[in-house]
Image: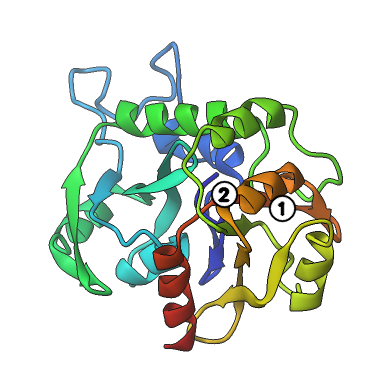
Amino acid sequence: MLGSGGVSDGYEVGSKRQRMMESNPYFAVSSGTGNLPYGYAGGFQPPPFPVVRLRGLPFNCTDIDILKFFAGLTIVDVLLVNKSGRFSGEAFVVFAGAMQVEFALQRDRQNMGRRYVEVFRCKKQDYYNAVAAEINYEGIYDNDYHGSSPPPSRSKRFSDKDQMEYTEILKMRGLPFQVTKSQIVEFFKDYNLIEDRVHIACRPDGKATGEAYVEFVSAEEAKRAMSKDKMTIGSRYVELFPSTPDEARRAESRSRQ
Protein backbone atom coordinates (compact mmCIF):
# COMPACT_ATOMS: atom_id res chain seq x y z
CA MET A 1 0.00 0.00 0.00
CA LEU A 2 2.43 2.51 1.05
CA GLY A 3 5.02 1.65 -1.42
CA SER A 4 7.01 -1.17 -0.08
CA GLY A 5 6.30 -0.38 3.55
CA GLY A 6 9.96 -0.27 4.48
CA VAL A 7 11.81 0.44 7.70
CA SER A 8 14.72 2.85 7.74
CA ASP A 9 16.75 4.57 10.43
CA GLY A 10 14.39 3.39 13.12
CA TYR A 11 11.27 4.78 11.51
CA GLU A 12 8.50 2.44 10.45
CA VAL A 13 7.01 3.88 7.30
CA GLY A 14 3.45 3.42 6.14
CA SER A 15 2.73 -0.16 7.11
CA LYS A 16 0.96 0.97 10.28
CA ARG A 17 -0.72 4.05 8.84
CA GLN A 18 -3.83 3.75 11.01
CA ARG A 19 -1.82 3.60 14.23
CA MET A 20 0.26 6.57 13.09
CA MET A 21 -2.91 8.59 12.41
CA GLU A 22 -4.18 7.85 15.90
CA SER A 23 -0.94 8.80 17.66
CA ASN A 24 0.27 11.80 15.63
CA PRO A 25 -1.27 15.15 16.72
CA TYR A 26 -1.50 16.30 13.10
CA PHE A 27 -4.07 13.60 12.43
CA ALA A 28 -6.15 14.32 15.56
CA VAL A 29 -9.82 15.14 15.16
CA SER A 30 -11.67 16.83 18.02
CA SER A 31 -15.19 18.21 18.31
CA GLY A 32 -14.28 20.54 21.17
CA THR A 33 -11.54 22.98 22.08
CA GLY A 34 -10.10 21.22 25.10
CA ASN A 35 -7.30 19.52 23.19
CA LEU A 36 -6.55 22.28 20.71
CA PRO A 37 -3.16 24.01 20.70
CA TYR A 38 -2.81 27.05 22.94
CA GLY A 39 -4.42 30.10 21.33
CA TYR A 40 -6.25 28.18 18.61
CA ALA A 41 -9.67 28.76 20.18
CA GLY A 42 -8.89 32.46 20.21
CA GLY A 43 -8.65 32.61 16.42
CA PHE A 44 -5.15 31.37 15.58
CA GLN A 45 -4.85 28.85 12.77
CA PRO A 46 -3.59 25.35 13.59
CA PRO A 47 -0.20 24.38 12.20
CA PRO A 48 -0.46 23.26 8.56
CA PHE A 49 -0.55 19.55 7.95
CA PRO A 50 3.10 18.59 7.21
CA VAL A 51 2.74 16.90 3.82
CA VAL A 52 4.33 17.47 0.42
CA ARG A 53 3.64 15.94 -2.97
CA LEU A 54 6.33 14.59 -5.28
CA ARG A 55 6.07 14.36 -9.06
CA GLY A 56 8.42 12.95 -11.68
CA LEU A 57 9.74 10.06 -9.60
CA PRO A 58 11.46 7.18 -11.43
CA PHE A 59 8.98 4.40 -12.11
CA ASN A 60 11.15 1.93 -10.19
CA CYS A 61 11.18 4.23 -7.15
CA THR A 62 10.58 2.77 -3.69
CA ASP A 63 9.90 4.35 -0.32
CA ILE A 64 13.54 3.67 0.58
CA ASP A 65 14.61 5.93 -2.32
CA ILE A 66 12.38 8.68 -0.95
CA LEU A 67 13.83 8.26 2.55
CA LYS A 68 17.30 8.72 1.02
CA PHE A 69 16.15 11.72 -1.04
CA PHE A 70 15.02 13.43 2.17
CA ALA A 71 17.99 12.25 4.24
CA GLY A 72 18.24 14.18 7.51
CA LEU A 73 14.49 14.84 7.74
CA THR A 74 12.02 12.90 9.88
CA ILE A 75 9.43 11.14 7.72
CA VAL A 76 6.20 9.83 9.25
CA ASP A 77 4.64 8.29 6.13
CA VAL A 78 5.29 7.72 2.42
CA LEU A 79 2.47 6.93 0.01
CA LEU A 80 3.43 5.95 -3.53
CA VAL A 81 0.50 6.69 -5.81
CA ASN A 82 -0.61 3.86 -8.09
CA LYS A 83 -3.08 4.05 -10.94
CA SER A 84 -4.59 0.81 -12.27
CA GLY A 85 -1.94 -1.16 -10.41
CA ARG A 86 1.03 0.78 -11.82
CA PHE A 87 3.15 3.41 -10.10
CA SER A 88 2.21 6.88 -11.39
CA GLY A 89 5.52 8.62 -10.61
CA GLU A 90 3.90 10.62 -7.80
CA ALA A 91 4.01 10.28 -4.02
CA PHE A 92 2.92 11.96 -0.81
CA VAL A 93 5.36 12.37 2.07
CA VAL A 94 4.25 13.27 5.59
CA PHE A 95 6.88 14.79 7.88
CA ALA A 96 7.09 15.17 11.65
CA GLY A 97 6.36 18.90 11.57
CA ALA A 98 5.84 22.03 9.51
CA MET A 99 9.50 23.09 9.67
CA GLN A 100 10.50 19.76 8.13
CA VAL A 101 8.26 20.60 5.17
CA GLU A 102 10.13 23.87 4.62
CA PHE A 103 13.41 21.97 4.42
CA ALA A 104 11.83 19.37 2.13
CA LEU A 105 10.66 22.07 -0.30
CA GLN A 106 14.27 23.17 -0.72
CA ARG A 107 14.92 19.87 -2.49
CA ASP A 108 12.54 20.72 -5.31
CA ARG A 109 14.06 19.92 -8.74
CA GLN A 110 16.88 17.85 -7.27
CA ASN A 111 17.67 14.58 -9.01
CA MET A 112 16.73 11.05 -8.08
CA GLY A 113 18.75 8.93 -10.44
CA ARG A 114 18.56 10.65 -13.81
CA ARG A 115 15.22 12.34 -13.16
CA TYR A 116 14.60 15.61 -11.39
CA VAL A 117 11.82 15.48 -8.84
CA GLU A 118 9.26 18.19 -8.22
CA VAL A 119 8.48 18.82 -4.54
CA PHE A 120 5.51 21.04 -3.79
CA ARG A 121 2.95 21.80 -1.11
CA CYS A 122 -0.41 20.08 -1.08
CA LYS A 123 -3.46 19.86 1.14
CA LYS A 124 -4.14 17.30 3.85
CA GLN A 125 -7.28 16.30 1.98
CA ASP A 126 -5.22 15.45 -1.12
CA TYR A 127 -3.21 13.01 0.95
CA TYR A 128 -6.34 11.55 2.59
CA ASN A 129 -7.96 11.10 -0.81
CA ALA A 130 -4.88 9.24 -2.05
CA VAL A 131 -4.92 6.99 1.03
CA ALA A 132 -8.62 6.26 0.49
CA ALA A 133 -8.04 5.45 -3.18
CA GLU A 134 -5.23 3.05 -2.29
CA ILE A 135 -7.37 1.33 0.34
CA ASN A 136 -10.23 0.96 -2.13
CA TYR A 137 -7.86 -0.66 -4.62
CA GLU A 138 -5.83 -2.83 -2.26
CA GLY A 139 -8.54 -3.77 0.26
CA ILE A 140 -7.98 -3.45 4.00
CA TYR A 141 -4.67 -5.34 3.90
CA ASP A 142 -1.28 -3.72 3.40
CA ASN A 143 2.01 -5.07 2.12
CA ASP A 144 2.97 -6.32 5.58
CA TYR A 145 0.05 -8.76 5.63
CA HIS A 146 1.63 -12.23 5.77
CA GLY A 147 -1.50 -14.34 6.00
CA SER A 148 -2.01 -17.48 3.99
CA SER A 149 -5.26 -16.25 2.41
CA PRO A 150 -5.52 -13.45 -0.15
CA PRO A 151 -7.45 -10.24 0.58
CA PRO A 152 -11.18 -10.45 -0.03
CA SER A 153 -11.05 -7.91 -2.88
CA ARG A 154 -8.83 -10.14 -5.00
CA SER A 155 -11.45 -10.90 -7.63
CA LYS A 156 -12.07 -7.21 -8.32
CA ARG A 157 -8.35 -6.47 -8.63
CA PHE A 158 -7.74 -9.46 -10.86
CA SER A 159 -10.54 -8.26 -13.11
CA ASP A 160 -8.83 -4.85 -13.30
CA LYS A 161 -5.48 -6.43 -14.14
CA ASP A 162 -7.11 -8.69 -16.70
CA GLN A 163 -7.99 -5.61 -18.74
CA MET A 164 -4.41 -4.32 -18.83
CA GLU A 165 -2.05 -4.68 -21.77
CA TYR A 166 0.31 -7.62 -21.40
CA THR A 167 3.81 -8.44 -22.58
CA GLU A 168 5.68 -11.64 -21.81
CA ILE A 169 6.95 -10.06 -18.54
CA LEU A 170 5.27 -10.17 -15.14
CA LYS A 171 6.36 -8.29 -12.04
CA MET A 172 6.14 -10.07 -8.68
CA ARG A 173 5.75 -8.05 -5.48
CA GLY A 174 5.61 -9.09 -1.82
CA LEU A 175 8.12 -11.93 -2.10
CA PRO A 176 9.92 -13.25 1.00
CA PHE A 177 13.28 -11.50 1.18
CA GLN A 178 15.02 -14.89 1.20
CA VAL A 179 13.21 -16.14 -1.91
CA THR A 180 15.30 -18.15 -4.38
CA LYS A 181 15.07 -18.52 -8.13
CA SER A 182 14.12 -22.18 -7.74
CA GLN A 183 11.15 -21.22 -5.54
CA ILE A 184 9.91 -18.84 -8.22
CA VAL A 185 10.33 -21.49 -10.92
CA GLU A 186 8.36 -23.91 -8.73
CA PHE A 187 5.68 -21.26 -8.18
CA PHE A 188 5.11 -21.10 -11.95
CA LYS A 189 5.66 -24.81 -12.63
CA ASP A 190 2.34 -25.11 -14.49
CA TYR A 191 3.26 -22.33 -16.92
CA ASN A 192 5.84 -21.99 -19.67
CA LEU A 193 8.36 -19.84 -17.82
CA ILE A 194 11.81 -19.09 -19.28
CA GLU A 195 13.92 -20.18 -16.31
CA ASP A 196 17.02 -18.14 -17.14
CA ARG A 197 14.86 -15.00 -17.41
CA VAL A 198 13.96 -14.82 -13.72
CA HIS A 199 15.43 -11.71 -12.08
CA ILE A 200 15.16 -11.13 -8.32
CA ALA A 201 15.47 -7.39 -7.73
CA CYS A 202 18.03 -6.15 -5.20
CA ARG A 203 19.04 -2.82 -3.78
CA PRO A 204 22.58 -1.55 -4.44
CA ASP A 205 23.66 -2.99 -1.08
CA GLY A 206 22.65 -6.46 -2.29
CA LYS A 207 19.54 -6.82 -0.13
CA ALA A 208 16.41 -8.11 -1.87
CA THR A 209 13.55 -5.66 -2.43
CA GLY A 210 10.79 -8.28 -2.33
CA GLU A 211 10.23 -7.89 -6.07
CA ALA A 212 11.14 -9.98 -9.11
CA TYR A 213 10.60 -9.98 -12.86
CA VAL A 214 9.81 -13.16 -14.75
CA GLU A 215 9.56 -13.82 -18.48
CA PHE A 216 7.25 -16.30 -20.19
CA VAL A 217 7.32 -17.63 -23.74
CA SER A 218 4.52 -15.28 -24.80
CA ALA A 219 2.25 -12.49 -23.60
CA GLU A 220 -0.63 -14.95 -23.65
CA GLU A 221 1.24 -17.31 -21.31
CA ALA A 222 2.06 -14.41 -18.98
CA LYS A 223 -1.60 -13.45 -18.87
CA ARG A 224 -2.53 -17.06 -18.13
CA ALA A 225 0.01 -17.12 -15.28
CA MET A 226 -1.84 -14.22 -13.65
CA SER A 227 -4.09 -16.86 -12.13
CA LYS A 228 -1.28 -17.20 -9.54
CA ASP A 229 -1.91 -13.62 -8.36
CA LYS A 230 -2.24 -13.58 -4.55
CA MET A 231 -1.03 -17.17 -4.20
CA THR A 232 1.62 -17.76 -1.55
CA ILE A 233 5.34 -18.44 -1.44
CA GLY A 234 6.16 -19.49 2.10
CA SER A 235 3.89 -17.49 4.40
CA ARG A 236 3.53 -14.47 2.09
CA TYR A 237 1.01 -13.92 -0.64
CA VAL A 238 2.55 -12.63 -3.85
CA GLU A 239 1.07 -9.93 -6.08
CA LEU A 240 1.52 -10.14 -9.85
CA PHE A 241 1.42 -7.24 -12.29
CA PRO A 242 1.84 -6.94 -16.05
CA SER A 243 5.24 -5.41 -16.78
CA THR A 244 7.45 -4.58 -19.76
CA PRO A 245 10.94 -5.59 -20.93
CA ASP A 246 12.08 -1.99 -20.36
CA GLU A 247 10.91 -1.99 -16.74
CA ALA A 248 12.62 -5.34 -16.15
CA ARG A 249 15.88 -4.09 -17.71
CA ARG A 250 15.85 -1.00 -15.50
CA ALA A 251 15.35 -3.12 -12.40
CA GLU A 252 18.18 -5.44 -13.42
CA SER A 253 20.51 -2.52 -14.13
CA ARG A 254 19.62 -0.94 -10.80
CA SER A 255 20.50 -4.17 -8.96
CA ARG A 256 23.99 -4.11 -10.52
CA GLN A 257 24.81 -0.55 -9.46
- Rendered-image quadrant of the C terminus: bottom left
Q: Viewed as shown, does residue 14 lie left or right of 65?
A: right
Q: Is residue 61 left or right of residue 52?
A: right
Circles 1 and 2: CB atoms closer than 8 Å: no
Q: Position of residue 140 (x, y in %)?
A: 66, 31
Position of residue 2 measured from the top left corner of the image (x, y, whole percent):
51, 47
Nearer to the camera, 65 or 162: 162
Give SS at disc 2.
strand
- In the rendered image, is residue 104 in sight? yes
Position of residue 208 relative to residue 232, above or below, is below
Q: Give the residue at mark 1.
A: 238
Comparing labels 1 and 2, the label whose residue is closer to the camera: 2
User: Residue at horizontal 43%, vertical 42%?
Assistant: 82
SS state under label 1: loop
Q: Residue 124 at x, y = what percent?
A: 31, 31
Disc 2: which residue: 241
